[in-house]
Image (cartoon, helix red, strand yellow):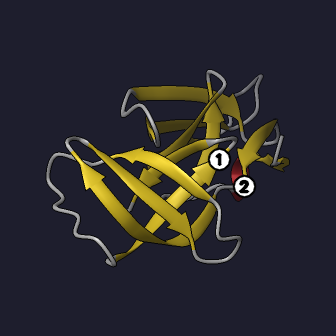
Amino acid sequence: MPREQKQVRELQEGSYVMMEDSPCKINAYSTAKPGKHGSAKARIEGKGVFDGKKRSLSQPVDAKVWVPIIQRKQGQVVSVSGDDAQVMDLDTYETFTMRVPEDEDFQPDQNIEYLEYEGQRKVV
């Protein structure tokens, strides 16, 4: 799996983190000062990159968490049929089918940018 470990204190808003075995983009990051008998805690709120679910995580700032390595790739739309689009990766020339987002309108020969992680793909 393309992922790495980082300490919670190294995370920031806009970066990615694994929450409940799903890659999430961090929307909010806050820390609480250390108390009399404990260490500083971080509260992270994120949204799933591929499923859109909101998740939260509370960890000590020196704990380690998994950070997914999500690739940003370029593709070209080959054909569109209904809600699906045939897309060709511009680096590997691999062809695959993607679901067209509701707010997008794809045309053949249009270049798009998409995110890929472990076979999951999403148009940016």
**Left or right: where 51 falls relative to 19:** left
Image position, residue 72 (x, y; %): 58, 67
In this rendering, position of residue 67 left or right of residue 93: right
Image spot of residue 40 (x, y percent): 69, 38
| Residue kind at label 2, given as amino acid type | Ile
| Relative to 19, 3 lies left or right | right
In this view, the residue in front, 114 or 47, is: 114
In the image, what residue type sits under mark 1?
Answer: Tyr
Q: Which residue is mark 2?
A: 69
Snapshot quadrant of residue 55: top left
**Which residue is located at x 65 percent, y 61 percent?**
94
Disc number placed over residue 117 in the picture, else none: 1
Q: Is residue 63 left or right of residue 30?
A: right
| Viewer-proximal residue among 37 and 64 | 64
Whether residue 37 can be seen here: yes
Task: Depth check: give the residue in front, 33 or 23.
Answer: 23
10 Å crowding of disc 1: few (<14), some (14-19), many (20+): some
Rendered image quadrant of residue 107: bottom left
Element carrying mark 1: strand
- Quadrant of the frame with the N terminus: top right
Residue visible at 47% across and 43% down in the picture:
49
Asked whether disc 1 touches disc 2, contact meaning CB atoms under 8 Å apart, the reply is yes
Q: Specify which label sits upstream in the sequence, 1 or 2.
A: 2
